[in-house]
Amino acid sequence: MEIVLIRHGESEADLLGVHEGRADFSLTGLGRRQVQAMAERVAAELPPQIIFASTLKRAQETATVLAGQTGVELQLLPDLMEINNGKQAGLPLEEGNRLHPLPTLPHVPFAEGESWFQFRMRAESVLSEIVTACLGKYERIAVVSHGGMISALIQSFLRMPAQNTCYFHSGDTAIHVLVYKEPQRMVRVMNDTTHLNGLDSSS
C-alpha cells in the first residue's frame, strides 16, 4: 500500500509572521493556487482511493480540493492536527519564542500544550489506526496534514526512536510517498513540490 503524505498550502500565518501549530488559519490566495496545482498532479499521477486529513482549516481546505479533484471520500481525523503548541499558538514569532520557547527536552510540554514525546505518540497511534483500517483494502491512500505531523508520521513509519532529533521538511503542498509492504517499508518520494514550478506567487 502507498501512503501519499501531503502538506497544506501557504496559510495566513505565513504572511502574518506568527506561530501556527494549533492556531487555526485559512489558506492564502497563493495557498489555494498551490493546492489546485497539487490536486491536479495527484489526481493524474498518484490518485488515492481515500483521503484522511487534519481538522484544522488549512489542511481541511487542502484536502477538500483534493477530494473534489479525485472524487474520493474524505475523512477528517483530529489526531492528524499539528503539535499542540499551547500558549505559543498565534503569537508573533519573536514574542512567542521569548515568552514560550520551544521545549528542549522531549518530555517537556509547551505551556498548556503537548510535549514532543506526546506528539510523536499521537502520530504513531493515528498512523497505526489508518494502516489497520486500510491495509489490504486500498492500494493507495492520501493523508493531508502539517509539516510537524508529517515529519512525525515519517519517523513513526521508519520506526525511528521517539527521542531522535531528525526532522523531515515539507514545503507548501509537498508530496511524500511511503510504501508499506511488510516486512519492508520504503520512502519513495520526499518533499516533492515540482508541481509549483512556474506558479505565479502574486496573491
Image: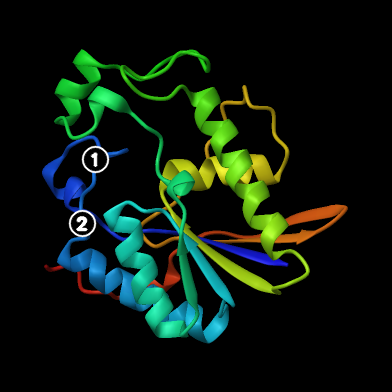
In the displayed structure, does residue 83 sit left or right of residue 201?
Answer: right
Q: Nearer the viewer, residue 35 or 51?
A: 51
Task: Look at label 2 and name its amino acid.
Answer: Ser
Image coordinates of residue 77 in percent, x first then y, are: 47, 53
Per the image, label 2 sits on a secondary structure element best described as loop
Q: Is residue 122 above or below residue 13?
A: above
Q: Nearer the viewer, residue 193 or 90?
A: 90
Residue depicted at x 25% and y 73%: 33
Q: Label 2: which residue?
A: 26
Residue depicted at x 56% and y 73%: 50
Dot 1 crowding, Cα within 10 Å, few <14, some 14–19, many 20+ = many
Check residue 13 in the rendering and tell me which mark sits there, or answer none.
none
Residue depicted at x 32% and y 77%: 36
Kindly indicate whether the residue at mark 1 contacts the one at mark 2 (C-beta within 8 angstroms).
no
Q: Which part of the image, by quadrant, shows the N terminus?
A: bottom right
Rendering quarter of residue 148: top left
Quick one: which residue is furthest to the right in this view? 183
Q: Label 1: which residue?
A: 23
Image coordinates of residue 125 in percent, x first then y, are: 62, 41
Q: In this view, does 71 lie above or below 15?
A: below
Tell me the CA gap for discs 2 and 1.
Answer: 10 Å
Residue depicted at x 20% and y 15%: 98
Q: Is residue 115 visible?
A: yes
